[in-house]
Amino acid sequence: MSGPSLRKQHSHHSIHDGIYTEARDLTTALKETFNKENNKYREEICDTLIEHWEKRTLAHAQSEEEGFFEEKMAENPDLLETIIRLKRDHQLLELIVKKIKQQIEKEGVTEDIIAYFEALLIVFDIHNEAEETSLF
Ligand SMILES: [Fe+2]
Ligand SMILES: [Fe+2]
């Protein structure tokens, strides 16, 4: 997920695409558990989804911040503002994941949690588009 694959537009886009698709499918699966009486997989799917955002998305963001963004700035110092905004997006994703965990700790996996997972998808999508168009 790190290294040269971040530096090529096509492979970076594929990383975003893979993460987004898996998160979207898991979110849909979680939503569906609220339509069924049998919801024995709800907690499990929710845990998998949180783990997905933490292990894939936040790890991807971290690897960008640990080298890729610096390299882009060295090539073009005008990107400073853009990179500050992109880092803020990463922070928002992290904050939403934290909120989800706090909410679940308080109330368990209720239907309200879906809005947070949908917010993650939207922020991630907007962020990726900005990243792909501004850094390549
Ligand atoms: Fe990013
Ligand atoms: Fe990225």
Image (tube, rainbow, N blue to C red):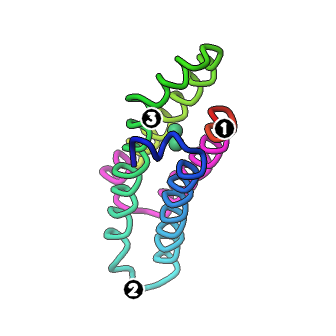
Q: Which mark is residue 111?
A: none
Residue at mark 2: 38
Mark 1 or mark 2: which is in front?
A: 1
Q: Main secondary structure of the magenta part?
A: helix
Residue at mark 3: 64
Residue at mark 1: 130
Residue 46's place in the image compared with 40, above or below, is above
Compare residues 108 and 84 and report the one nearer the observer.
84
Residue 80's place in the image compared with 21, above or below, is above
Q: Is mark 3 within 8 Å of ligand 1?
A: yes
Magenta span: 101-130
Q: Type of residue at label 1?
A: Ala
Compare residues 74 and 109 and report the one nearer the observer.
74
Give residue 16's position: percent from left, percent from top: 54, 52
Give residue 76's position: percent from left, percent from top: 61, 18
Q: Type of residue at label 3?
A: Glu
Mark sitting earlier along the chain (2/3): 2
Residues at marks 2 and 3 touching, judged by CB atoms closer than 8 Å:
no
Give residue 126's position: percent from left, percent from top: 65, 44
Q: Residue at x 49, y 57 (%)?
A: 19
Q: Secondary structure at mark 3?
A: helix
Is residue 127 within the magenta segment?
yes
Inter-mark Cα distance, 3 to 1:
14 Å
Mark 2 or mark 3: which is in front?
A: 3
Mark sitting earlier along the chain (3/1): 3
